[in-house]
Image (tube, rainbow, N blue to C red):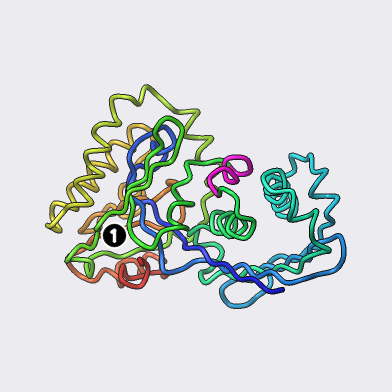
């Protein structure tokens, strides 16, 4: 027996944090993602090996079926986190442990693990594909979060994502700006924890209902934008609103105040990638400031 599954990575362009509470978000699946390969293994256990984009082994464990079935642990080590995901998957489909002798499973990222493009969401979606269970439900029961990353894992086009009455709504969007050569992604040299960022957001959460219509409007306008200058304006407006909500300076104010162009945080503020919009190629500007991971839009987005 050998089975292989694949899921796309993700970038959240608008609606960060607010998407948790029902705002409409624009999200882009990436050309990078993760593979999951399953073969028959030793009786009563799963041998698990996770490989980074360069084939380096970053995680390897042997986990018994009993550990998965009886799991009851709040430890957040990599091993315990994986067992928790498998335990929740078992609750949704017990047959995968009851009808097999054992498994040998490997995962392979096609992007560096620290990039924050969805190491966890691509894993959860791959496990859900394998076991024929609902990936959104598996995410909710294990990691939590809005689920936009699962929607990106499952779609090969830009999407609007929104939680309506507690359920994920996904709409394919024809977002293919003519000026994509002026769009770039820059890595901020630090991985940001989604879990801790979300917890911080809820601590600072104010009355957000008045903000949602404006964020939703900006999201729709960005998806339909035909002018580079208009895109810059909309991104700046979105950054200003979120700066007030989070009580944090924008990434441009914080790190790149002298930059001639727009810079938009993507997902959790303070880490991972930012979207850069510039009339001229800004590679040298960011390299001079020590930010050397620079990806062109056409190389990143599906």
In which image quadrant can residue 17 be found? Answer: top left
Q: In this view, does 205 lie to the left or right of 81?
A: left
Tally the numbered discs.
Answer: 1
Please identify the quadrant where the C terminus is shown.
bottom left
For disc 1, the neighbor class at 10 Å (few under 14, some 14 to 19, many from 20) is: many
Against 188, is 236 above or below?
A: above
Residue range highlighted in magenta: 135-143
Residue that mark 1 sits on:
276
Question: Which residue is at 86% across, 50% downward?
Answer: 66
Q: Is residue 138 magenta?
A: yes
Q: Is residue 202 magenta?
A: no
Please identify the quadrant where the N terminus is shown.
bottom right
In which image quadrant can residue 16 be found? Answer: top left
Against 6, is 93 above or below?
A: above
Q: Where is residue 108 in the image (x, y as percent from the top left)?
A: 60, 71
Label 1, secondary structure: give it.
strand
Residue closest to the far bottom:
55
Q: Where is residue 62 in the image (x, y as percent from the top left)?
A: 82, 62
Question: Which residue is at 43% across, 27% downward?
Answer: 205
Against 39, is 206 above or below?
A: above
Q: Main secondary structure of the magenta part?
A: helix
Question: Which residue is at 79% across, 62% downward?
Answer: 46
Q: Position of residue 140 (x, y in %)?
A: 57, 40
Quick one: 107 or 231, which is closer to the camera? 107
Q: In this view, does 23 lie to the left or right of 116?
A: left
Against 259, is 72 above or below?
A: above
């Amino acid at each position: 027996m050998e089975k292989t599954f694949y899921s796309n990575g993700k970038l959240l362009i608008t609606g960060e944090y607010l998407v948790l509470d029902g705002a409409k978000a624009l999200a882009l699946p990436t050309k990078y993602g993760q593979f999951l390969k399953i073969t028959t293994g030793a009786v009563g256990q799963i041998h698990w090996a996770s490989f980074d984009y360069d084939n380096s082994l970053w995680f390897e464990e042997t986990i018994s079926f009993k550990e998965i079935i009886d799991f009851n642990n709040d430890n957040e080590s990599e091993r315990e986190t994986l067992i928790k995901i498998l335990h929740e998957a078992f609750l949704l489909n017990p047959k995968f442990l009851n009808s097999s002798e054992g498994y040998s499973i490997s995962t392979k990222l096609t992007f560096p693990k620290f990039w924050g493009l969805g190491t966890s969401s691509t894993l959860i979606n791959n496990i859900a594909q394998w076991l024929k269970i609902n990936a959104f439900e598996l995410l909710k029961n294990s990691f939590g979060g809005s689920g936009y990353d699962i929607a990106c894992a499952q779609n090969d086009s830009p999407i609007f994502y929104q939680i309506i009455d507690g359920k994920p709504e996904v709409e394919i969007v024809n977002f293919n700006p003519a000026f994509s050569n002026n769009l770039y992604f820059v890595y901020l040299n630090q991985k940001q924890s989604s879990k801790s960022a979300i917890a911080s957001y809820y601590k600072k959460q104010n009355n957000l209902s008045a903000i949602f219509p404006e964020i939703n409007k900006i999201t729709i306008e960005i998806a339909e934008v035909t002018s580079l200058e208009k895109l810059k304006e909309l991104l700046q407006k979105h950054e200003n609103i979120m700066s007030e909500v989070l009580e944090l300076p924008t990434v441009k104010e914080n790190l790149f105040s002298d930059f001639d162009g727009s810079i938009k945080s993507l997902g959790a503020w303070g880490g991972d990638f930012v979207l850069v919009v510039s009339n001229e190629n800004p590679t040298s500007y960011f390299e001079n400031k020590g930010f050397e991971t620079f990806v062109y839009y056409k190389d990143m987005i599906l």
